[in-house]
Amino acid sequence: MHVLIIDDELALRQIIAATVRRAGYSADIAVGVKDAAAKLVRGDIDVAICDIRMQDGDGVDLVRSMKSSGVPTLFIMVTAFASVQTAVEALRAGAMDYMVKPVDSEELLYRLRQAQTLLGLKAENVALRKIVSGERGDSRFKFTSSSMAAVERLATRVAAIDSTVLITGESGTGKGVLARFIHDQSRRAEAPFIPVNCSAIPENLLESELFGHTKGAFSGAAQARKGLFAQADTGTLFLDEIGELPLHMQTKMLHVIEDKEIRPVGGEQLRKVDTRIVVATNRDLPMMVAAGSFREDLFFRISQFHIDIPPLRNRGEDILRLINFFLDAAKQKGETNIELDSAAEELLLEYPWPGNVRELENVIGRAMIMSDGGKITIGDLPPSLSIRTGKFEGEQKSPLASRSLRDQIRQAEADIIFRVLTECDGDRKAAARQLEIGLSSLYRKLEEFEALGQGLVRTNEDFRRSERNG
């Protein structure tokens, strides 16, 4: 819980701040109404301990202003002027409670505990209302396979507690979706859910992104910046690709998980954070531990609860339901009303889906665009699926049968490249990294593949369109 002490008396600020920090809460200070307003509007202050009479303004007016602006902070008012009228005025303005100077430490801590309980109850009540009204859960995909039903049951149990969770599985299996599900089913559902891909942040910026920095901490730090841990305070931080963290950051991450404290780059003061951590990876962390590239103590910390998502090829019962789920979602949005013909359905069920659910969703999305008669046929699907399964539209034979060895090799290469592009959501830079080729080489190959047939030309243009659109 993050507490702001607002008072123009230095000694009182210091005494209250020390009491708050000893109790395990994060404490910040403001020297008056203007200073406090600038900090409160950020929306990250849980409780404000606020003097009523200050040199630059009135604490009751500050409460009214913040409440009218939608700032969710709870206010505990403090004054040396003990009067029922003042107390009633503060409570009517929206304050939670009222104390008289001199402030008793035990009484203050009691009221802070009450505030913490109230914050938790508010989150739980909102979550319960959403469950009762059907706002959360009814629109989720319902799995058919026993393996994914078991995953969902475990995730639901884990959501009820605040333990760190490790989610593993191949690329495209839905690790991010499961992390969001855990957050949405938890008491933190109304707090921020912040996803971050550890491999997408340059190593020299990673510490600043996660923990924040002070003004002037490094070249270009023109102003202070709150890190992702602080932004996710009271909520959930989802660290995808945790296996990509460099060793020195793994050490810092271990300390944050153990101590629930962060130190911004360039800062001297530690700040308490109440952030739940969910991590994911498609790498073999035990093997990385054995190789010395991942800390064993961090592995044990993040894997207190381990959920492994099976690949789509091992749960074929879910494929058709997922397809219908994607088609129904598009229909409900008014985008299209398309069905699947039997031949296309058979091909989709036989394809091994190396890119998992992400690849399936992209294939169905593309097929809806390519379809003309209200039905998705084999001809609307990417040629790579037909090549892999040997199924073609009508009496059409495999294009490889009449091509030279060179063309067949190029076609196989195209199949691999377009699959990786699908896994990377059309991001050519990410695909080039995964394929371990230069970006210019990838562009050159995509141009070459246009000579292999109209099907691949259309696939390539699909990725161009997705790249242009963002």
Image: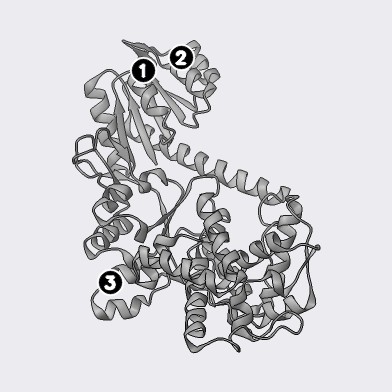
- Specify the amino acid type for callout 3: Phe
Percent x, y for residue 248? 21, 61
Disc 2: which residue: 61
Q: Secondary structure at mark 2?
A: helix
Q: Nearer the viewer, residue 420 or 86?
A: 420
Q: Of label 3 and label 1, which has the lower sequence position? A: 1
Q: Nearer the viewer, residue 72 or 337?
A: 337
Q: Badge 1, how many Cα within 10 Å: few under 14, some, many 20+? A: many
Percent x, y for residue 432? 39, 66
Q: Nearer the viewer, residue 136 or 29?
A: 136
Q: Badge 2, how many Cα within 10 Å: few under 14, some, many 20+? A: some
Disc 3: which residue: 294
State which mark lies toward you, 3 or 2. Answer: 3
Q: Of label 1 and label 2, which has the lower sequence position? A: 1
Inspect this view and state whether residue 384 appears: yes
State which mark lies toward you, 3 or 1. Answer: 3
Disc 1: which residue: 33
Inspect this view and state whether residue 153 appears: no
- Specify the amino acid type for callout 1: Val
